[in-house]
């Protein structure tokens, strides 16, 4: 008799537990926000990881931000456009090219990708052995070169620049990530490797530990070849002397702006809340603590390098800050 009385109670408890689990899973699925980063050894992934682990971001109750590795800028552009990633890091040039249907071998228009903020300037870096005699991109003809991951911004910009310089089809191309390229370079399996990332790069530091290295003056190549006139979203800069071991002179180069972007389907209040969380003195201090490159992040620079539309949540935030 007693068992019969307990049976309905057990049924009710089991039902309550089941419903709790169902609603918890459903709630978690609704809250999951993917932030697309990049490959190991690059700064894109550091951005995504830094945002994910920041305690005030983790404490936000309505969503759960999860960093996700990717091939880089081009892959992030496509995934954010398809809302497979709600946030991502993409070069400003790729956002512009994608929105206008001008990506190489890709006529699609990626119009669902919106700027959230400027993060940092990402310069081109071409690493060669110090005694190689390679002084210009044109000296790479016949050489084995690491050109970045297929699908990455590094690869796309390498193809763009090397094609402009007339050497893309005259080198032995090796598509690989920065750390893999640095290792192959150290083992004398590559004559050079290309990066498109903030400095100092961990991969270049790694290469300089095993080899005497030099950086090619890409700024001179770009200036003399009319590169800036053809691709006006690139800007000039120089990698300071002493950034890497053995490179004791200033090296001119060019850069694109790395942007935090969001899908058009990402809620405006979420974008606004994320910016309000990261762009505080504490949030910016956290970002710089993850990588010194992020010292470029500030309210005053938040709209730099953006030549495409802002997400509505970002537009509200930056207007309130007097930057739009």
Image: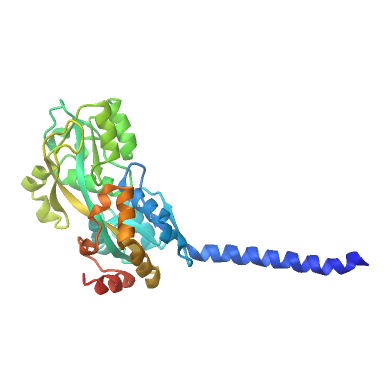
* Residue 260 on image: x %, y %: 31, 59
Q: Judge by depth and name the residue closer to the eye, 24 or 225.
A: 24
* Residue 234 on image: x %, y %: 16, 54
Q: Judge by depth and name the residue closer to the eye, 276 or 39.
A: 276
- Considering the image in quadrants, where does the C terminus appear? bottom left
Determine which quarter of the picture holds residue 309: bottom left
Residue with the most extreme front position: 282
Q: How many labels does the image show?
A: 0
Q: Judge by depth and name the residue closer to the eye, 217 or 288.
A: 288
Residue with the most extreme right position: 1
- Considering the image in quadrants, where does the N terminus appear? bottom right
* Residue 197 on image: x %, y %: 25, 46
Residue shown at 30%/74% (left/top)? 316
Determine which quarter of the picture holds residue 321: bottom left
284 sits to left or right of 220: right
Determine which quarter of the picture holds residue 117: bottom left
Q: Which colour scheme is used?
A: rainbow
Q: In this view, does 6 lie above or below 236?
A: below
Tell me, yes or no, if residue 196 can be seen here.
yes
* Residue 87 on image: x %, y %: 37, 60
Tell me, yes or no, if residue 190 can be seen here.
no
25 sits to left or right of 155: right
Residue shown at 82%/69% (left/top)? 8
């Amino acid at each position: 008799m007693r068992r019969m009385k307990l049976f309905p109670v057990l049924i009710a408890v089991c039902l309550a537990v089941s419903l709790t689990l169902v609603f918890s899973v459903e709630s978690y699925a609704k809250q999951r926000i993917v932030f697309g980063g990049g490959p190991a050894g690059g700064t894109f992934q550091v951005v995504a990881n830094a945002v994910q682990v920041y305690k005030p971001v983790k404490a936000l109750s309505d969503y759960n931000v999860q960093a996700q590795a990717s091939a880089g800028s081009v892959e992030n552009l496509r995934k954010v456009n398809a809302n497979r990633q709600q946030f991502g890091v993409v070069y400003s040039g790729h956002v512009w090219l994608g929105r206008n249907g001008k990506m190489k071998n890709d006529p699609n228009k990626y119009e669902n990708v919106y700027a959230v903020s400027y993060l940092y300037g990402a310069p081109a870096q071409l690493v060669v052995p110090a005694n190689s005699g390679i002084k210009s991109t044109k000296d790479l003809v016949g050489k084995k070169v690491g050109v970045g991951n297929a699908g990455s911004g590094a690869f796309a910009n390498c193809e763009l620049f090397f094609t402009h310089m007339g050497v893309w089809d005259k080198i032995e191309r090796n598509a690989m990530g920065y750390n893999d390229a640095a290792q192959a370079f150290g083992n004398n399996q590559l004559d050079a490797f290309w990066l498109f990332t903030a400095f100092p790069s961990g991969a270049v530091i790694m290469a300089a530990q095993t080899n005497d290295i030099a950086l090619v003056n890409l700024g001179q190549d770009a200036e003399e070849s009319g590169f800036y006139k053809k691709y006006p979203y690139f800007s000039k800069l120089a990698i300071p002397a002493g950034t890497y071991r053995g490179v004791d002179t200033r090296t001119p180069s060019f850069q694109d702006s790395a942007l935090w972007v969001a899908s058009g389907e990402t809620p405006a209040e979420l974008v606004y809340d994320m910016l309000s969380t990261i762009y505080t003195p504490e949030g910016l201090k956290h970002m710089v603590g993850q990588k010194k490159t992020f010292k470029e992040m500030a309210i005053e620079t938040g709209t730099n390098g953006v030549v495409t539309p802002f997400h509505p949540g970002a537009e509200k935030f930056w207007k309130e800050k007097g930057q739009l």
